[in-house]
Image (tube, rainbow, N blue to C red):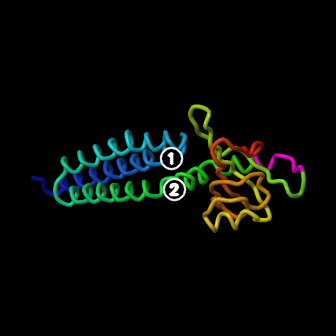
Amino acid sequence: MFHGLDKAIYKDRFAWWFSLCVLGCGVLVLFPLTVSSSDLSVALYALATVPIICFFLLILSYKYRGKQRVAALSTFAAFLIYTAALFTHFIDTRDAVRWFVHGRALKDEVLAQSVLTPASLRHVEWEGWGFAGNDTTVYLVFDPTDTLATGANLRESGKFGHLPCEVFRIRRREKGWYTVQFYTNTDWDYCGN
């Protein structure tokens, strides 16, 4: 089918197209993880990202032959494995991506707050969701003494450090920085009954 120079151009064109598609797929994978709430990001990923990426990778595997087809099908298989792993660890993966993308700005916002007492923890809302008056809030908390490390290491709910309420989940982002998920209908200023 191809001879000499034509074959080299064909391989170069595939390499360029394939690299561009993989880059685009990478952007599509990260986009829903960073720009929306956790519920919406799952829906965006499952209903938009997965079908679009699968469509492009399958088109590439159909269009090309030989080693190019193997490369496209291998990438498709790797994407499916990645998607399965992502869904099993969605919250932790999403938070890690959000921390990488938005962490610097959020840390600056928290550090700009004044310290009320030595035991007070500076914080901002990391995320919130709810329906029909049942709201759940997650805070980004700066704990310079790492008193929340115990809760993060145990991966259990409870009352930890200088938090005002019992909380559902604590996850460590980096030394001194934690995301703290309060129980539904509780928040930093209201601990419920």
* Residue 40 included in the magenta stretch of the image: no
> Where is residue 130, by image quadrant?
top right
Please report whichever mark, 2 or 1, sits nearer to the chain's N-terminal start: 1
List the single residue furthest toward the right: 117
Viewer-closest of 149 and 186 = 186
Q: Are marks 2 and 1 in contact (CB under 8 Å)?
A: yes
Viewer-closest of 156 and 148 = 156
Q: Range of the magenta residues? A: 110-116
Residue annotated with mark 2: 93
Describe the element under mark 1 as helix, strand or loop.
helix
> Where is residue 118, by image quadrant?
bottom right
Look at label 2 and name its amino acid: Thr
Instruction: Give the distance between the C-alpha atoms of the residues marked 2 and 1, in whole angstroms.
Output: 8 Å
Q: Is residue 81 left or right of residue 104?
A: left
Q: Position of residue 146 (x, y in %)?
A: 75, 65
Residue annotated with mark 1: 33
